[in-house]
Amino acid sequence: MTCPQPLPSLNVHTLMPVTERPEQVFVRGEGAWLWDAAGQRYLDWLQGWAVNALGHCPPVISQALQAQSSLLLTPSPALYNLPALQLAQALCGLSGMDQVFFGSTGAEANEGAIKLARKWGRLHRAGAHEIITFENGFHGRNLATMAASGKPGWDEMFAPRMEGFAKARLNDLDSVKARLSQRTVAIMLEPVQGEAGVRPASPAFLQALRALCDEQGLLLIFDEVQTGCGRLGELFGFHHFGVRPDILTLGKGLGGGVPISAVLAQAHCSVFEHGDQGGTYAGNPLMCAVALGVLAEISQPAFLAQVRRIGLQLQRGLQALSEEHGLGEVRGAGLLWALELGQDHAPALVRACRARGLLVNAARPHCLRFMPRLNSTAEEIEHGLAVLGAALAAQHHTSMAA
Ligand SMILES: Cc1ncc(COP(=O)(O)O)c(C=O)c1O
């Protein structure tokens, strides 16, 4: 148990107001649970936005941090270190890719993938540089990845816009074909659009994109920052869909709560040379040691089978709630799910769940998203569903009374 802690005098306005935050200050996490400074406990189905694959502060991470932090923190990105080499080798072995570049964030990994594709286009496609990306897609918040994202208005928010991204519609092959030109070098997408409200590409669409890329000599890039690292019940989302990309990006769950991301590429398009890419913390041994520990756990077949089993329990529970309360579609896989509400009740439900001790996300005003830790127990899922059910019932009564 965590006792309420007297907080020092804090001024929330010293943080730039880049997002709406609830008033609570969170002070401790353990496994599925988060505690605020008042001692209130929350079942956490945000888990750092699908980051904490093994929940809050798992022993494997504390141990890796402790051991590596007294051994070697950051030699230099221009020197080899053991954890980076071990992690690169492990990721290549597990994914079938040939080379890796490590970054710290998903946006950085995706920017690396964009640079890699552009360089490959210069070398092998007569300077083709345009990448077909998708409406409502999300690839990060640096300038390149905002332009690549398909959030309405995003490419113009910090004008001038970065050129080179043509937008198609998910699961609409004709819309992709209509964007093809001599300038096209790659197609880039999330196999499941997470921020858009857990919208999966269909296996047939991904297969068709693979065939189109092969036929046209284009690169297929999967942004698996959210869907990778066990989230869909397979180690990589592309295993779930049975379609192999040429370039794959990972982030979030790879570090299980610490900042590390990766761009993986097949040999034929792994064209970075000295000076093309880098970063002070690229492949630092502290983060790589943590990721090695996380990967050793989440890549076990028995672990992934359990993610699928628990995911099924969550899916069935959400479907039952949807039927009981007359709501909409339940979408997702593994432990990434969304529930369509049919009305813009999601922000109010997020607040109602939080007041009852459950943290969930409103991916869209009309849609809730659930991202529990991958090692969730059946009891946690049952508890979360019961709290959500109570919040939905209260919402129903409020709507009836209004
Ligand atoms: C699919 C996808 N790509 C990229 C990102 C950006 O990752 P980061 O916030 O670590 O830069 C996210 C974050 O939500 C994501 O879901």
Image: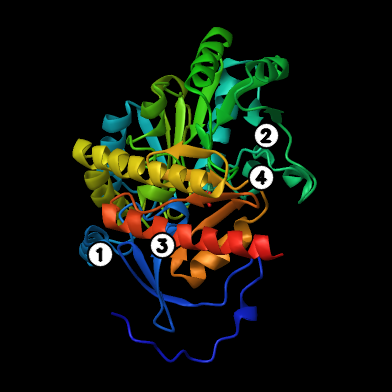
> In whole angstroms, how far apart are the C-alphas of marks 3 and 4?
28 Å
| Labels 2 and 3: the sequence-earlier one | 3
Cα separation between marks 1 and 2 = 39 Å
Q: Which residue is mark 3?
A: 44
Q: Which residue is mark 4?
A: 146
Residue type at numbered disc 4: Met
Marks 4 and 1, how far apart in space? 34 Å
At mark 3, the secondary structure is strand
* Residue to which mark 2 is pinned: 135
Residue that appears at 30% across and 63% down? 31
Respond yes or no on whether mark 4 lies under 8 Å from ligand 1.
no
Q: Is the CB of mark 2 within 8 Å of ligand 1?
A: no
Residue 33 percent location from the top left of the image:
35, 66
Q: Nearer the viewer, mark 3 or mark 4?
A: 3
Q: Looking at the image, which residue is at 38% across and 87% down?
A: 4
Residue 195 at x, y percent in the picture:
57, 46
Query: What secondary structure is found at the residue carrying circle 2?
Result: loop
Q: Can you say whether 70 is above or below 284 in the image?
A: below
* SS assignment at label 4: helix
Give the label on residue 62, or none.
1
